[in-house]
Image: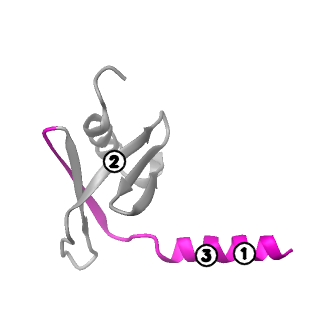
Amino acid sequence: MLSALVALLLLSREYRYQPTGGLRVVKSDYQLSAQWLSEEGELENEQPVNADYVGPWLIGLRVGPQRLWLWPDSLPAHSQRALRRLCHRPGR
């Protein structure tokens, strides 16, 4: 019972601190970086991006210290294809 309560508190905290707005990802040479675009239209500081999981249905990104999972319905199809092209490493 106690472990279920702790898990519920941790999940609610993660949900509450999920980023909102848009994520602008750019690639220069072999490095990905991103900036959050707030709902007010302001760009935040640029942060390094590491795509550590690119599966057929799910993309796992680390944007600075944050962990971000992108599901197929979390962005338009053309944006998802563009992000997959950015994250693709030749030979993998």
Q: Position of residue 81 (x, y in %)?
A: 31, 38
| Res 12 label | 3
Kind of residue indicated by mark 1: Val
Query: Looking at this rendering, what residue extends furthest in the right direction?
Result: 1
Query: Looking at this rendering, what residue extends furthest in the left direction?
Result: 28
Q: CA distance from mark 1 to mark 2?
A: 29 Å
Q: CA distance from mark 1 to mark 3?
A: 10 Å
Which residue lies at the image location 46% right of the left edge and 50% below the top edge? 73
Q: Quadrant of residue 12?
A: bottom right
Is residue 24 shown left or right of residue 12?
A: left
Q: Position of residue 16 (x, y in %)?
A: 51, 77
Q: Earlier in the sequence, mark 1 or mark 2?
A: 1
Magenta highlight range: 1-29
Label 2, on which residue? 50
Kind of residue indicated by mark 3: Ser
- Is 45 situated above or below 84? below
Q: CA distance from mark 2 to mark 3?
A: 25 Å
| Res 6 label | 1
- Is 86 situated above or below 70? above
- Depth check: give the residue in front, 5 or 23: 5
| Labels 1 and 3 touching (C-beta < 8 A) | no
Q: Position of residue 64 (x, y in %)?
A: 32, 61
Report helix, strand or loop for mark 1. helix
Is residue 83 shown left or right of residue 9?
A: left
| Labels 1 and 2 touching (C-beta < 8 A) | no
Q: Is residue 14 magenta?
A: yes
| Labels 2 and 3 touching (C-beta < 8 A) | no
